[in-house]
Image (cartoon, rainbow, N blue to C red):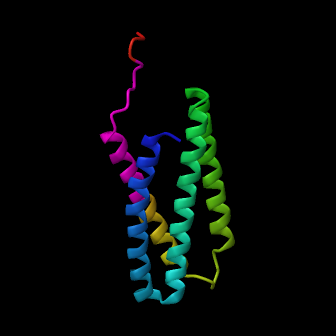
């Protein structure tokens, strides 16, 4: 993993964790312990999904741009399928508050995605290889 990738991960993980903690605090007030558990599970799932994608796509990028794109699309498809299965399995659960889970997951995904866009916009990454035209 390159230094830019690690920096981008850190710049996304820290604000996302803060959003997750804020959501857990709101869920504690609104739904009690089950709300906190739902928020924490959502934060963990979103963070794990994005970390796995970044690591896998980063390794594929070393091979070629084509394999990186295929890997990115494949990991996206797998994550969507896993999310669909998880939400279907826990639709009527009483273990945690599903509303707190869903709202926290959406907030964390938006935060992570926004900070990723911000960090890559600020990065000075060549999009054309110097010397090759």
- The answer to whether residue 72 is visible is no
Relative vertical location of residue 106 with respect to residue 73 in this rendering, above or below? below
- Nearest the eye: 73 or 3: 3
Does the segment drawn in magenta span residue 77? Answer: no
Relative vertical location of residue 40 with respect to residue 126 in this rendering, above or below? below
Prevailing SS of the magenta stretch = helix
Q: Quadrant of residue 49?
A: bottom right
Identify the residue at horizontal 57%, vertical 40% (top origin): 57
Left or right of residue 101: residue 133: left
Residue farthest left in this picture: 122
Quarter of the picture containing the C terminus is top left
Identify the residue at horizontal 45%, vertical 42% (top origin): 3
Identify the residue at horizontal 40%, vertical 81% (top origin): 25
Where does residue 61 sit, x and y in percent of width and height? 56, 33
Left or right of residue 39: residue 19: left
Magenta range is 110-129
Relative vertical location of residue 105 with respect to residue 73 in this rendering, above or below? below
Residue farthest front in this picture: 3
Q: Quadrant of residue 81?
A: bottom right
Callout count: 0
Where does residue 74 sit, x and y in percent of width and height? 64, 42
Left or right of residue 106: residue 55: right
- Nearest the eye: 38 or 47: 47
Identify the residue at horizontal 53%, vertical 41% (top origin): 1
């Amino acid at each position: 993993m390159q230094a830019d990738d690690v920096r981008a991960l850190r710049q996304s993980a820290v604000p996302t964790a803060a959003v997750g903690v804020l959501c857990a605090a709101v869920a504690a007030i609104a739904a009690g312990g089950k709300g906190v558990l739902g928020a924490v599970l959502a934060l963990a799932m979103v963070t794990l999904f994005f970390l796995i994608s970044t690591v896998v796509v980063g390794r594929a990028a070393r091979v070629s741009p084509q394999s990186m794109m295929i890997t990115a699309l494949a990991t996206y498809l797998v994550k969507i399928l896993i999310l669909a299965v998880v939400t279907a399995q826990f639709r009527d659960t009483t273990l945690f508050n599903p509303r707190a889970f869903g709202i926290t997951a959406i907030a964390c995904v938006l935060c992570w995605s926004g900070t990723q866009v911000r960090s890559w916009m600020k990065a000075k990454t060549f999009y054309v290889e110097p010397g090759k035209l």
